[in-house]
């Protein structure tokens, strides 16, 4: 009788472990916006009570909100967002064919269709944390034309600070404005105390930190890039392509 009970307990334990593993698998690649739509008490996106992002699904949720992907677009103007821990984007990256048809990360802010542009206008504080495994593969013209690429695709009057982005692999075709951290920055945007490491390639205006901007009115301070930057057109630079 004791042997049967032990065997039953072992089977139950394995079942519970399997259920937890399955639950973890299901959670991946589901952009989460709860940190914004139903934040913990007291959090309102102010400087003293910023929205908190703690994993890849939360970060993908930020892209979903800014891009208006199935929701009303939010540009986060005047709102503060802080990263609470290091994040790997592997679940949204290379080899993950179940996400974005294997094309990798969807930038935060980009050209949705034609001239419809979504921008991030808020303050993103990396809190001296790092984001790894940023992968974007848009090697056909139909998936890359006229869309800026990077962790952030398009920021306008926004601020990105205190963040490291490592293990970057961005490959695009027929695409201008490609950057390791920001593809296209406008409206007096600032990028400070940040770095990126990896490989970035595009056509024109390709940079390790920022791809380009409209009126050269952006500020980049205390930033560096390590890796390779390549492009077949004009404006290719290790930090910012067009400045």
Image (spheres, grey):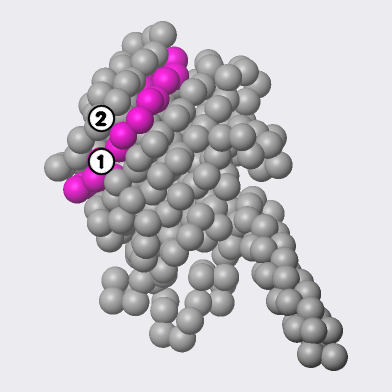
Q: Which residue is mark 1?
A: 195
Which sits earlier in the primary sequence, circle 2 or circle 1? 1
Residue 178 horizontal/vertical position (percent): 41, 27
Q: Quadrant of residue 78?
A: bottom left
Looking at the rendered structure, which numbered label has been put on residue 90?
Answer: none
Is 71 placed above or below 36 here? above
For residue 142, what is the image quadrant? Answer: top right
> Measured along the vertical axis of the image, is residue 131 above or below residue 20?
above
In the rendered image, residue 66, in percent from the top left (x then y), is placed at 52, 52
Badge 2 crowding class, 10 Å Cα cut-off, few under 14, some 14 to 19, many 20 or more, is some
Q: Is residue 129 left or right of residue 104?
A: left
Is residue 194 found inside the magenta-colored segment of the image? yes
What residue sits 85% from the left and 91% below the top? 1
106 lies left or right of 87? right
Is residue 1 shown above or below 103? Answer: below
Tell me which residue sits at (54%, 53%) in the image. Answer: 60
Q: Quadrant of the C terminus?
A: top left
Find the residue positioned furthest to the top: 232
Q: Nearer the viewer, residue 116 or 142?
A: 142
Let me know if residue 127 appears in the view: yes
Contact between marks 2 and 1 (CB within 8 A): the answer is yes
The extreme left residue here reads 222
Residue 148: percent from the left, percent from the top?
47, 31
Instruction: Tell me which segment is drawn in magenta.
Output: 189-206
Q: Is residue 184 visible?
A: no
Q: Is residue 213 magenta?
A: no
Q: Which mark is residue 226?
A: 2
């Amino acid at each position: 009788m004791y042997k049967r009970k032990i065997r039953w307990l072992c089977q139950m334990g394995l079942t519970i472990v399997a259920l937890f593993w399955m639950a973890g698998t299901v959670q991946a690649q589901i952009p989460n916006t709860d940190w914004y739509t139903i934040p913990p008490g007291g959090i309102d996106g102010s400087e003293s009570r910023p929205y908190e992002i703690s994993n890849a699904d939360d970060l993908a949720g930020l892209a979903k909100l800014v891009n208006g992907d199935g929701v009303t677009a939010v540009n986060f103007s005047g709102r503060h967002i802080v990263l609470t821990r290091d994040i790997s984007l592997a679940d949204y990256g290379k080899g993950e064919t179940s996400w974005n048809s294997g094309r990798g990360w969807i930038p935060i802010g980009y050209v949705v269709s034609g001239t419809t542009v979504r921008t991030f206008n808020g303050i993103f504080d990396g809190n001296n944390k790092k984001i790894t495994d940023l992968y974007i593969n848009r090697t056909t013209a139909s998936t890359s034309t006229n869309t800026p690429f990077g962790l952030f695709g398009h920021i306008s009057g926004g601020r990105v600070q205190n963040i490291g982005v490592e293990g970057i692999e961005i490959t695009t075709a027929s695409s201008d404005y490609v950057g390791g951290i920001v593809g296209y920055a406008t409206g007096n945007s600032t990028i400070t105390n940040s770095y990126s490491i990896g490989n970035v390639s595009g056509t024109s205006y390709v940079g390790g930190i920022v791809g380009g901007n409209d009126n050269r009115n952006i500020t980049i301070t205390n930033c560096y890039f390590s890796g390779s930057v390549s492009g077949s057109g004009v404006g290719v630079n290790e930090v910012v392509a067009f400045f």
